[in-house]
Image (cartoon, grey):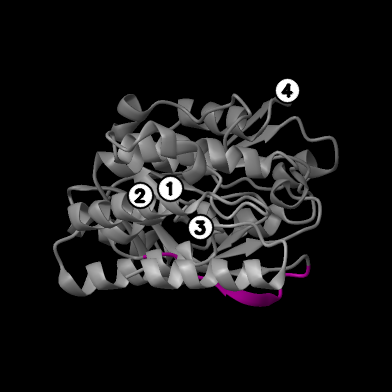
Amino acid sequence: MEGPLVSVIMPVYNTEAYVGASIGSILQQSYRHFELIVVDDGSTDGTDAVLRTFTDPRIVHVRQANGGVSAALNTALRHVRGSLIARQDSDDISAPTRLARQVEWFQANPEAAILGTWGYFINGDGLSERVLERPVTDAAIRFALLFDSPFVSTSVMWRTALMERCGDFDDSRNVWDDYDMWSRLVPLGKAGNLSQRLVGYRIVGTGLTMTNKAAPAWVEEQRRRNIVRAIPDFPPALVEPFCGNGREHVSIGNKAFRRIKEELLRYIGAITKDEAERASLVETLRATLMNWRVVQHHTFLHRVADHLIKRLQLP
């Protein structure tokens, strides 16, 4: 068989209506040298019956007591035999060429650690609503990682050999399991996103992203970890203002704003020497910081002052 063996890991919990289409989209891949590890995390609906209708020998079916997404992912990792691991959620779908395109990229980039793709949103009926785009280059991904996850998680593929260095998915419930894992993988090699819409990401009202009230705190905790990892000499007094960036009704103050801007500009200079990419990242930084608040917006004049202060300070 040509090419590396790919292990697709799929955590499943109560997705009776969608898991069949999700598994089907993997079985229809043009790249055939893969295994699909499906971990049913204690589903209580008809999910198990749907899973048992699939008899393809490439499927490894594991059922366990409910422990959460991270626990299911870590169980799947114990069964991986491939040199590349691909993530897919049980209510999402992959285009037929997804695995082939990603395998080709890893073969062309031996120093690579992690790769995602662009995608599109789908609703409960599977209809395309809008596109999902993420930064493409290694430097742009490293910069975006400071603020939020730069990947469509259901599209990500990474090297199995790196798992010994980065560890399992975090099941402590104080960070996003995906955002945390990608944050640990990116420093271990080249990162990328294919600018092709190769996955469909399903939005349903009962999903964790839509219902988790702890989400803002989880994102802030991951920002905290990432800024310290990426910029070890980042001033400790600025870590909390940075982590709370963009939070509603929070102002960070003019002095902190200016210093954070300077630190991030230096970081951009450190991660890329390409002038065009540097200019693009500076513009991204400018747009991001314009959404922060230097002063509270108590009145219209406060809003005007806040806008002018930022306009005068930003590149």
Q: Distance between the residues labelled 3 and 4?
A: 27 Å
Q: Earlier in the sequence, mark 3 or mark 4?
A: 4
Q: Nearer the viewer, mark 3 or mark 4?
A: 3
**Circles 1 and 2 in contact, beta carbons < 8 Å:** yes
Mark seen at residue 259: 2
Q: Position of residue 103 (x, y in %)?
A: 31, 56
Q: Distance between the residues labelled 1 and 2?
A: 5 Å
- SS for tag 4? loop
Q: Mark 1 points at which residue?
A: 256
Compared to 142, does 234 lie above or below? above
Magenta stretch? 125-135
199 and 173: which is toward the camera:
173
Q: Distance between the residues labelled 3 and 1?
A: 31 Å
Would residue 312 be found to the left or right of residue 107 on screen? right
Q: Where is residue 101 in the image (x, y as percent from the top left)?
A: 35, 65
**Circles 3 and 4 in contact, beta carbons < 8 Å:** no
Q: Mark 4 points at which residue?
A: 65
Residue type of the residue flagged with mark 1: Ala
Q: Position of residue 2 (x, y in %)?
A: 25, 53
- SS for tag 3? loop
Q: Quadrant of residue 167?
A: top left
Query: Is residue 95 visible to us here?
Result: no
Residue type of the residue flagged with mark 4: Ala
